[in-house]
Image: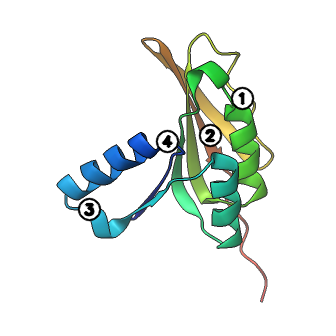
Amino acid sequence: GADVTFVDSSRDSGAAIRANVAELGFGARATMLGSEVRRALAALGAAHESFDLIFVDAPFKDDMSAEVLQLLCRYGLAASNGWMVVEQSKRAPAAPDAPAGFERVTVARLGDHRLAFYRREETPPRNS
């Protein structure tokens, strides 16, 4: 089965996430990193983690979506053919451009929010 890693610097949000995951019976398959996002992404990169789906929900008042996308790429956290989804306020500047190696597939508006979908280009197989 799939595993999930949550990153949130808020102690209250982290507690709510842990409680919800436990209530759903997925505690063994979820990891909660209660850390500032830059530090958390660096740690995940150092651990050589990669993810098939990454959801970026930066604070609306201090939108740092473009920076987070760049960090995700720098640390190689999106798996080959992986997806990154960025949620922003519709009042935020335009959805970030696709980082190198990614395609911005679509941008959709849902109420007061904007969702941008990015797909990582397939990594060619290595010659052995």
Q: Is residue 26 left or right of residue 91?
A: left
- Residue drawn at x 76%, y 78% is 126
Which of pointers 3 and 2 indicates the residue nearer the eye? 3
Q: Is residue 114 left or right of residue 73?
A: left
- Of badges 1 and 4, the one in the foreground is 4
Q: CA distance from mark 3 to mark 1?
A: 32 Å
**What residue lies at 45% left-to-right and 45% top-to-bottom?**
11
Q: CA distance from mark 4 to mark 2?
A: 26 Å
For discs 1 and 2, the disc positioned in front in the rendered view: 1
Residue 84 % position (x, y): 58, 44
Asked whether residue 2 appears in the rendered view, the answer is no
Hey, which residue is sitting farthest front in the picture? 11
* Disc 4 versus disc 2: nearer the observer: 4
In contact (CB < 8 Å): disc 3 and disc 1: no
Which residue does the numbered mark 1 point to in the structure image?
96
Q: Position of residue 26 (x, y in %)?
A: 26, 62
Q: Quadrant of residue 79?
A: bottom right
| Position above or below: 98 against 94 | below
How crowded pointer 1 is (Cα within 10 Å; few <14, some 14-19, many 20+) is rated as: some
Q: CA distance from mark 1 to mark 4?
A: 25 Å
Secondary structure beneath disc 4? loop
Whether 108 is drawn above or below 21: the answer is: above
Is mark 4 in CB contact (under 8 Å) with mark 2? Answer: no
Is 2 left, or right, of 99 in this rendering?
A: left
Please tell me which of labels 3 and 1 falls first in the chain: 3
